[in-house]
Amino acid sequence: MPKNPDVPIIKAAELGKQVSTGDTELTILAGVSFEVRAAESVAVVGVSGSGKSTLLALLAGLDTPTAGTVHIEGQDLYALDEDGRAALRGRLAGFVFQSFQLLPAMTALENVMLPLELAGAPDARAAARAMLERVGLGARLHHYPKQLSGGEQQRVAVGRAFVGRPRLLFADEPTGNLDPATGAEVIELLFSLNRESGATLVMVTHDEALTRRCDRVLRLASGRLVNGQN
């Protein structure tokens, strides 16, 4: 996919999501439109239930909309089948979740190696080892998630997200399960790696410290975008 600086890396147009609850339709998102330029950092905020995580899932192709479109670097995401969307994510995107989403039967090193191995990248072990050194876990390579603190697990998750040098990073409440001091360390790490990589960051958060670090804020209320449109 060509990198055209005139094409936004993300373009959402009239995005909507409804789900059936018995005899009624529940609207989670309605008429959401915005663009994100390459290397921007964007915080998605709003009260619980406003549709933030659903929006992130739709932008990443992890869920399907009932209305509207998402284009990633000009590619209509939902013109692709599920395998096509997965391939696009593997090529362009990294993810950091509130619950870390590490595989418990794999060591820290193996968790960070995984996206590289799935992509068929050479020297996955060396690249993963270097990334864990970068996030301050060079002495924890062979520890399993249950042997790591919450902050260490999130550092592994951040390392896994960045190891493949993604153009897009999606983060869903990355400090939500961490105490304030540990959360501040993870914030600093996240933004340091993002500056180094030049990735575009789209992040759902309740954390005001995280929001202040972002270039722009998209605010949702009752499934609608109330500020932040282009």
Image (cartoon, rainbow, N blue to C red):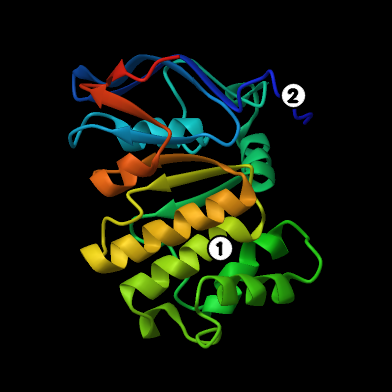
Quadrant location of the N terminus in the rendered image: top right
Q: Position of residue 132 (x, y in %)?
A: 57, 74
Quadrant location of the C terminus in the rendered image: top left
In the rendered image, is residue 175 in sight?
A: yes
Q: Position of residue 172 (x, y in %)?
A: 37, 47
In the rendered image, is residue 207 in sight?
A: no
Which residue appears at 38% of the width and 81% of the height?
148
Q: Residues within 10 Å of mark 1 (few under 14, many from 20)?
A: many
Circle number at residue 212: none
Q: Position of residue 105 (x, y in %)?
A: 49, 78
Depth-wise, is mark 2 or mark 1 nearer the camera?
A: 2
Q: Which residue is mark 1?
A: 160
Is 195 placed left or right of 83 in the picture?
A: left
Q: Is residue 228 above or below residue 150?
A: above
Which residue appears at 48% of the width and 86% of the height?
143
Question: Regarding mark 2 in the picture, which secondary structure is present there?
Answer: loop
When asked about the image quadrant of residue 5, the answer is: top right
In depth, the one of 104 and 38 nearer the eye is 38
Is 96 placed left or right of 18 in the picture?
A: right
Q: Position of residue 41 (x, y in %)?
A: 47, 37
In depth, the one of 132 and 21 nearer the eye is 132
Which residue appears at 30% of the width and 18% of the height?
227
Tag 1 or tag 2, which sits nearer the N-term?
2
Which residue appears at 66% of the width and 39% of the height?
88
Residue type indicated by callout 2: Asn
- CA gap between label 2 and label 1 equals 27 Å
In depth, the one of 60 and 127 nearer the eye is 127
Q: Which residue is mark 2?
A: 4
CB contact under 8 Å: marks 2 and 1: no
